[in-house]
Image (tube, rainbow, N blue to C red):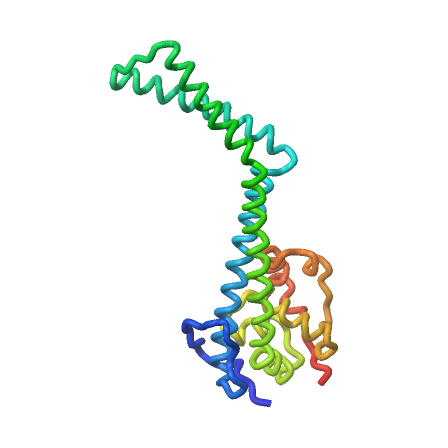
């Protein structure tokens, strides 16, 4: 079984959603796999950012946070009016100040009333990120069947560190580990050392653990 692990460079190029032909050159398949991995990580990064934003703006203590931001808004407007008064000698009457803060309060109440709709919009973004990430990972699996999996079986036994080095560090170790889990579940690979914490950690955090233990994670083919 031929191996393409010792190639020097990936051939980067723009790709569409179609999968490669059965006769596609393995190095080109690796380039497509790298592109899909970048899409997967980008979708995951956007997902994390949107989830953090949802917790911050619409979490359990979000009402208190919104009220605090409204208080900050009052302070900022008051400071801006003071600066305008000092720099441009603009003086407002008491009723004008009151009217301005009433308008600010009305705006805040309107935003607060739309809080549920804004939360639903953000949840739609989260669902979209999850779908994009799932699609990218499924495409990674299809591409790995014509590139990564045959090479791992051909080089078996091989450690995760060696696999990463063979691929010139072009891939995150957690990406390789996630892809190879599919072969392990299918019974075609055996992993000597199980890192339980890696299985529950997101890939971004699992990468740190895998870098530390990559030499001891060895994959053996059962084919």
User: Residue 181 appears in which quarter of the rendering?
Assistant: bottom right
Vertical arrangement, residue 6 with respect to residue 178, above or below: below
**Residue 39, how many percent across, how many down?**
50, 64
Pick the front one: 42 or 148:
42
Pick the front one: 96 or 79:
96
Residue at left 56%, top 56%? 128
Residue lying furthest bottom = 1
- Image quarter where the N terminus lies is bottom right
Residue lying furthest top = 94
**Residue 196, how many percent across, how many down?**
73, 60
User: Residue 61 appears in which quarter of the rendering?
Assistant: top right
Q: Locate residue 102 relative to residue 90 in the image: left or right.
A: right
**Residue 202, how many percent across, how many down?**
63, 56
Residue at left 48%, top 69%? 35
Pick the front one: 223 or 104:
104
- Image quarter where the C terminus lies is bottom right
How many discs appear?
0
Residue at left 52%, top 73%? 33
Residue at left 52%, top 74%? 167
**Residue 216, how many percent across, how many down?**
67, 69
Vertical arrangement, residue 215 with respect to residue 109, above or below: below
Vertical arrangement, residue 154 with respect to residue 44, above or below: below
Q: Locate residue 121 relative to residue 193 in the image: left or right.
A: left
């Amino acid at each position: 079984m031929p191996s393409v692990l010792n190639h020097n460079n990936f051939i980067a190029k723009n790709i569409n959603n179609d999968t490669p032909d059965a006769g596609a050159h393995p190095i080109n398949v690796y380039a497509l796999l790298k592109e899909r991995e970048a899409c997967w990580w980008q979708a995951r990064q956007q997902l994390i950012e949107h989830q953090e934003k949802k917790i911050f703006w619409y979490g359990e203590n979000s009402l208190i946070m919104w009220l605090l931001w409204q208080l900050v808004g009052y302070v900022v407007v008051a400071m801006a009016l003071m600066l305008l008064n000092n720099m441009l000698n603009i003086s407002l009457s008491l009723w004008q100040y009151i009217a301005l803060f009433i308008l600010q309060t009305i705006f805040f109440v309107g935003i607060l009333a739309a809080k549920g709709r804004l939360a639903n919009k953000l949840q739609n973004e989260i669902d979209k990120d999850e779908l994009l990430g799932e699609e990218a990972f499924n495409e990674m699996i299809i591409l790995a069947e014509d590139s990564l999996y045959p090479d791992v079986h051909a080089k078996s036994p091989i450690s995760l560190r060696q696999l990463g080095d063979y691929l010139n560090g072009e891939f995150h170790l957690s990406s390789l580990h996630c892809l190879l889990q599919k072969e392990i579940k299918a019974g075609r690979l055996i992993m000597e050392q199980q890192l339980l914490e890696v299985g529950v950690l997101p890939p971004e955090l699992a990468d740190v653990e895998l870098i530390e233990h990559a030499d001891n994670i060895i994959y053996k083919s059962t084919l």
